[in-house]
Image (spheres, grey):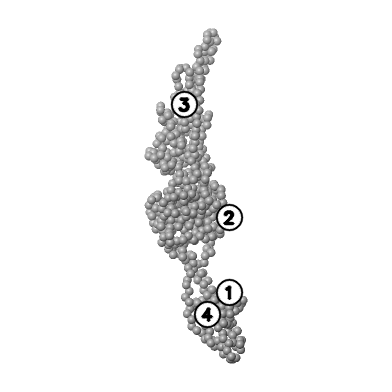
């Protein structure tokens, strides 16, 4: 478990408590001076905790960067060569020196799921650095010397109402106020008490010798005011880092299994075989009918002419004809022959002539033109110009419903979002593909053999699987014969040719997404908000859980051949899409919003949705 030391200013206590609560729920061992207990040698305890931490976290505000105590804590961290992560929590904080050289995590807007994940990524990176086991050749940082106005110089420690020490003589003397000034008063008071005790003993001895009454002894009184501390914790998500320093497998791009839908060539050959079967049936039926007619010459009249059944014009191969003939059984031929006799017997007329000379005359007939029937994938291969031009097509694959995404184009990115969403550029898909209708459920993940290291944060068969790394998500999709969708595919399935801001339209509607929920609520069952469906029928593409895509987090424009779809890259950040149940800002739930994080990151707001070519 990664150990963190947090240095902060007392004026930022509320923010610090919220941040520490989230980090602790993310399985970090966090220490800050609120953990000091009575009787502790507080400065020595702080030095010990800095020495024990894996990463030193400095919360930056104008108060903290000018505090002698925060400066001393930072100096000790540098002396011990500890990895440092800085977080700017107030706007217009003036940074200089070593602090100005460190890239900070921006939390000026407050704590949300985006910047907390960026912080986790920074901590993970710094904690992975080689440990420097020897401190610099300087003594431990001394307790800083405070100016006279101690309360102003030390505003960043929690207010602790320590019992005040008052002296009865001389009358009116009181201890100076302030959190560390109280400590000084106690030290001075203890010294005075010792001196007075010695004086009392000496006076007692002299009194016993001279038989004179002792002088008045100073009296100590202790005043202990009550103190109440309230801590408010904001709803949080749980994030966990899975150690992947020792890979156990070789990661290669998965090979999708065959799609059960026939290809256009296979469909045409099947039609050819069926037409050949019909042709052979007609020929064999005709032969049987002629043979039976010849044996009935004495009973029937002469047939003046025969008309062949229309036969489609085909150009079969020898193998095709052999295959079609093999499919016809003797029983089927006899049945068709009987049908033929029944259909033609009514047209025969008996004559008094016993001798008949049957004549077979072929009458030319028009060959019907076959009207081609397009398969589903052939229809989807025609570029779609607008969202309204497509009707959702769901289909079951091994018990999981997927929806068909037709060929088409859209404008990827947004001028209304962050800089990593620009420039806006066109992406086209000449071939259709399938994508899961919902996020992968916990039941399907287990049923189909999914494997991950961390248990779900919110149990439920119909809830989305979460706390899953990019590697685990990729391997699960490969088990299904599929893959993770690319970043471009995911956004196209969510927005369509109309380039919508959200899956359902351009206007934010909180009733159409699972978002801004408390930690007691967490995720929801997948697919419960039908009105939030995208143009292809995909559900929960905004909210519930963030979804891993295959792409590396790189600058736009998106180019699939530039290396960003390298499945073997184990270190660079990957992209998350869609927002989650924690997201309280509609901007995070836009279909164009991008979030890049280390692939071994997981949390109870991170899930997966698979695709199939």
Along the viewing direction, whichever of 229 and 509 lies nearer the viewer: 509
Callout 2: 10 Å neighbours few (<14), some, many (20+)? Answer: few
**In this rendering, is residue 495 above or below 98?**
below
Going from N to C along the chain, the mark reached first, 3 or 2, is 3
Going from N to C along the chain, the mark reached first, 4 or 2, is 4
The residue at the point 55 percent across, 83 percent down is: 347
Callout 3: 10 Å neighbours few (<14), some, many (20+)? Answer: some
Residue at label 4? 309
Going from N to C along the chain, the mark reached first, 4 or 1, is 4
Secondary structure found at label 2: helix
Which quarter of the picture shows residue 174? top left
Residues at marks 3 and 2, CA–CA distance in whole angstroms:
63 Å
Residue at label 2? 447
Secondary structure found at label 4: loop
Would residue 459 be found to the left or right of residue 17 on screen? right
Residue at label 1? 327
Q: Position of residue 108 (x, y in %)?
A: 41, 41
**Mark 4 or 1: the one toward you:** 4
Callout 1: 10 Å neighbours few (<14), some, many (20+)? Answer: few
Residue at label 3? 182
Callout 4: 10 Å neighbours few (<14), some, many (20+)? Answer: few
Along the viewing direction, whichever of 571 and 324 lies nearer the viewer: 324
Residues at marks 1 and 2, CA–CA distance in whole angstroms:
39 Å
**Mark 4 or 3: the one toward you:** 4
**Mark 4 or 2: the one toward you:** 4
Secondary structure found at label 3: helix
Secondary structure found at label 1: helix
Q: Position of residue 378 (x, y in %)?
A: 47, 66
**In this rendering, is residue 396 above or below 150?**
below
């Amino acid at each position: 478990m990664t150990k963190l030391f947090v240095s902060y200013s007392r004026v930022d206590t509320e923010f610090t408590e919220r941040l520490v609560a989230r980090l602790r729920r993310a399985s970090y061992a966090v220490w800050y001076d609120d953990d000091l207990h009575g009787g502790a040698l507080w400065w020595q305890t702080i030095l010990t905790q800095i020495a024990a931490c894996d990463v030193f976290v400095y919360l930056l505000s104008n108060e903290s960067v000018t505090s002698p105590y925060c400066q001393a804590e930072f100096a000790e961290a540098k002396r011990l060569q500890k990895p440092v992560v800085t977080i700017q929590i107030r706007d217009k904080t003036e940074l200089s020196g070593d602090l100005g050289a460190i890239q900070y995590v921006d939390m000026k807007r407050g704590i949300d799921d985006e910047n907390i994940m960026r912080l986790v990524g920074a901590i993970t990176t710094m904690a992975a650095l080689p440990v420097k086991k020897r401190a610099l050749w300087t003594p431990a940082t001394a307790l800083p010397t405070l100016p006279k106005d101690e309360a102003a110089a030390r505003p960043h420690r929690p207010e602790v109402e320590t019992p005040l020490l008052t002296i009865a003589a001389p009358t009116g003397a009181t201890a100076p106020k302030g959190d560390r000034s109280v400590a000084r008063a106690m030290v001075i008071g203890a010294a005075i008490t010792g001196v007075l005790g010695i004086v009392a003993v000496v006076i007692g001895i002299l009194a016993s010798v001279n038989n004179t009454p002792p002088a008045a002894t100073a009296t100590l009184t202790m005043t202990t005011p009550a103190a109440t501390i309230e801590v408010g914790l904001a709803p949080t998500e749980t994030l966990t880092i899975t150690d992947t320093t020792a890979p156990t497998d070789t990661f290669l791009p998965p090979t999708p299994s065959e799609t059960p839908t026939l290809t256009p060539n296979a469909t045409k050959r099947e039609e050819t075989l069926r037409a050949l079967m019909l042709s052979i049936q007609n020929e064999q039926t005709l032969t049987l009918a002629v043979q039976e007619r010849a044996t009935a010459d004495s009973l029937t009249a002469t047939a003046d002419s025969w008309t062949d059944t229309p036969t489609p014009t085909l150009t079969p191969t020898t193998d095709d004809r052999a295959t079609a003939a093999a499919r016809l059984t003797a029983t089927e031929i006899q049945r068709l022959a009987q049908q033929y006799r029944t259909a033609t017997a009514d047209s025969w007329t008996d004559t008094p002539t016993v001798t008949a000379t049957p004549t077979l005359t072929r009458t030319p007939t028009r060959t019907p033109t076959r009207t081609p029937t397009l398969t589903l994938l052939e229809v989807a291969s025609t570029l779609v110009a607008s969202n309204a031009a497509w009707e959702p097509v769901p289909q079951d694959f091994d018990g999981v419903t997927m929806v068909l995404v037709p060929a088409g184009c859209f404008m990827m990115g947004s001028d209304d979002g962050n800089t990593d969403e620009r420039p806006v550029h066109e992406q086209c898909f000449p071939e259709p593909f399938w994508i899961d209708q919902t996020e992968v459920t916990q039941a399907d993940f287990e049923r189909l053999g999914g494997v991950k290291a961390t248990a779900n944060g919110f149990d439920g068969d119909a809830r989305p699987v979460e706390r899953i790394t990019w590697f685990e998500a990729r391997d699960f999709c490969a088990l299904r014969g599929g893959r993770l969708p690319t970043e471009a595919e995911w956004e196209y399935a969510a927005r369509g040719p109309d380039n919508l801001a959200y899956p359902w339209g351009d206007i934010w509607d909180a009733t159409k997404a699972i978002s801004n929920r408390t930690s007691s609520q967490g995720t929801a069952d997948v697919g419960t908000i039908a009105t939030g469906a995208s143009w292809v029928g995909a559900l929960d593409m905004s909210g519930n859980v963030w979804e891993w895509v295959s792409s590396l987090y790189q600058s736009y424009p998106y180019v699939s051949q530039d290396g960003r779809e390298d499945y073997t890259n184990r270190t660079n950040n990957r992209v998350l899409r869609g927002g989650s149940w924690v997201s309280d800002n509609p901007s995070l739930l836009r279909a164009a919003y991008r979030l890049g994080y280390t692939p071994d990151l997981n949390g109870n707001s991170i899930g997966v949705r698979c695709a199939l070519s």
